[in-house]
Image (tube, helix red, strand yellow):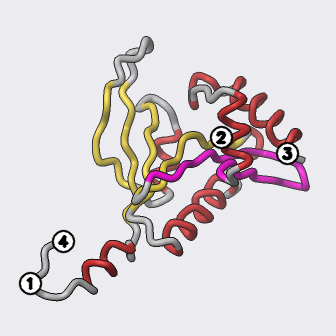
Amino acid sequence: MANDALGYVLQLEKKHFEEIGFLPSPRLEAYLRAGQLWMAQENDEYCGFMVWGRGWPILRVYQVCIQYDAQRREHGFGLVRRLIAKADQEGYEAISCYVADDIDANHFWRAAGFQCIGQRDNGNRRGRLHNHWVMRMPNPIQADLLATCPKGTKT
């Protein structure tokens, strides 16, 4: 299954390179081994994927892609909801991703409840700006840690 998943991701990544960019195969393999490459399925076949990474206190989404014929069917939202549940359960502060400002995925992130908090210019050859989408988690663990500090102590 791991090889099938990786082959599928590489194929979809190549097809949608302009929208999602490129992560090399060894890096994708490392994410897969770490459990940070999640697959979406429809009728027992892959239809998309999400690659994410840990960066305490923020989970970072590196790529999400749902194949064209399976879009608008909740597969992307399902992957994002799963990541939201993980971030909330583990006490992360937020989930973050960068999305090229000229692609439709920006509508997806807004609909998923994320807020665009700014843009960055990587000086890339395409001249694109990237929107920074963030979802703040309601119960970050830092809030619990700060609440347990005795009054008058410095943090």
Based on the picture, tell me whether residue 52 belongs to the magenta stretch.
yes
- Residue 65 point in image, percent of width and height: 65, 40
Region of the chain picked out in magenta, as a range = 36-55
Q: Amino acid at mark 4?
A: Thr
Q: Nearer the viewer, residue 17 or 101?
A: 17
Dot placed on the residue nearer the N-terminal end, 4 or 2: 2
Residue for badge 3 = 2
Instruction: In the rendered view, tell whether residue 141 sits above or below residue 25.
Output: below
- Residue 21 point in image, percent of width and height: 57, 27
Q: Amino acid at mark 2?
A: Cys
Tag 3 secondary structure: helix
Q: CA distance from mark 3 to mark 1?
A: 52 Å
Q: Amino acid at mark 3?
A: Ala
Residue under the point 23% across and 83% down: 149
Residue under the point 59% across and 64% down: 81
Instruction: In the rendered view, tell whether residue 68 sits above or below residue 83.
Output: above
Residue for badge 1 = 152
Q: Amino acid at mark 1?
A: Gly
Q: CA distance from mark 4 to mark 3?
A: 44 Å
Residue for badge 2 = 65
Density class for disc 3 (Cα within 10 Å; few <14, some 14-19, many ≥20) is few
Q: CA distance from mark 2 to mark 1?
A: 49 Å
- Residue 112 point in image, percent of width and height: 50, 58
In the drawing, what numbered circle is on residue 118?
none
Based on the picture, tell me whether residue 154 belongs to the magenta stretch.
no
- Residue 136 point in image, percent of width and height: 37, 63
Residue under the point 70% across and 30% down: 26
Dot placed on the residue nearer the N-terminal end, 2 or 1: 2
Residue for badge 4 = 155
Q: Nearer the viewer, mark 3 or mark 1?
A: 1
Tag 1 secondary structure: loop
